[in-house]
Each structure stands twice: as structure tokens, then as C-alpha cells.
Amino acid sequence: MNNGIVVQAMKELDIDQVLKLWSDIFGSSFLESSVTKSDLIGYLKKNPETSSVACNGDGKVIGALLCGNDGVRGFIYHIAIYEEYRVNEINKSMLDRSLKKLKEVGIKTGFIFTQKYNHDTDVAFNSIGWDVIPNEFNLNI
């Protein structure tokens, strides 16, 4: 990756920075209704290697993508990158890495959940066989 940015598997040590990133990008109410630190630890244990983070040269998490599978389909959630880094194709690098990891475990199709309708994102994912589902609902179970 250029500019000293490294894309790698999200690890438990990254979680605090990832949660801060998501809070900064999506707002604190997003985390309250979406994912806790405990939830994320459990998700990473069930889906090792598929979620991705992008880190700058100082080791700061500047991008994150939550990814996993149920054995049949893959799932991508919560893609976020700090605005000042969005010009470096970090989004594509994280997606490529996570999709490669899904493919390595036999996953061929999946779903991406987005915060709101985004035609470019929808077209890109539909072109590789994924269905885009806007995250417009909240199950209170």
C-alpha cells in the first residue's frame, strides 16, 4: 500500500481504535444500536482473518471493514475510512483483502449492508454477484 498504509486482518488489539473510527464516521448512536466491544471480539473469534483494517505508518487505524461468513454466504458491514485518507484507494484494498479471505474458505457470494443508498457502491457489488441491502431496519430482539 502506498504512503506507508498497511491493510491487514482486524485483531482484538485494534477494536478500541475501530470503535472510535466508526463512532467518528457514523456517530455515537450508531454504536449504541449496532455493535459493542464484546460483540466485536466474539465476531472476530468466529470469523478470524476476514475483517480488515488499514493502518497508517504510526499504527493508527484509519480504515476498517467488518467481514465474516455463515459457511454459505459472506457478509460485509461497517466500511469506514477517515476522510483525509479516502483518496488512497484504501476502501478497495480492504475489500480486496476481505473478499480474498472469504474466497479462501469457499465463500462465493454474499451480502453487503450499507448505511444508505449509494448507486456506485450498489453497482460495484452487484457486478461481482453480491446483493446490497440498505441498513434501514433495526431488530430489537
Image (spheres, grey):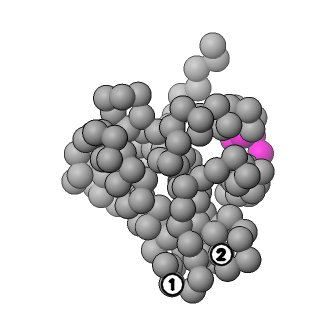
Which residue is identified by label 1?
A: 2
At label 2, counting other C-alpha atoms closer than 10 Å, the crowd grade (few under 14, some 14-19, many 20 or more) is: some
Examine the rendered structure and indicate whether residue 120 appears above or below residue 50. below
Locate residue 73: give its quadrant.
top left
Q: Is residue 11 magenta?
A: no
Residue that appears at 31% across and 29% down:
72
Q: Quadrant of residue 35?
A: top right
Look at the picture and state if 124 lies above or below 4.
above
Density class for disc 1 (Cα within 10 Å; few <14, some 14-19, many ≥20) is few
Q: Secondary structure at mark 2?
A: loop
Q: Which residue is painted at 58% across and 20% down in the image? A: 139
Q: Is residue 6 left or right of residue 38?
A: left
**Which label number is shown at residue 85?**
none
Mark 1 element type: helix
* x then y, percent, for residue 29: 75, 40
Q: For residue 80, say whether it is visible.
A: no
Q: CA distance from mark 1 to mark 2?
A: 10 Å
Residue under the point 58% across and 26% down: 138
- The three-letter code of the residue at mark 1 reads Asn
Residue 50 higher or lower than 57, as above or below? above
Between 77 and 44, the one nearer to me in the picture: 44
| Residue 82 position in % (x across, y down) | 64, 68
Q: Main secondary structure of the magenta part?
A: helix
Span colored in magenta: 27-31
Query: In percent of the image, x 42 and y 34: which residue is there?
Result: 69
Query: Mark 2 — residue?
Result: 56
* 10 over 81 or under it: above or below: above
Q: Amino acid at mark 2?
A: Asn
Question: Could you tell me residue 51's position as x and y percent?
Answer: 52, 49
* The C terminus - image quarter: top right
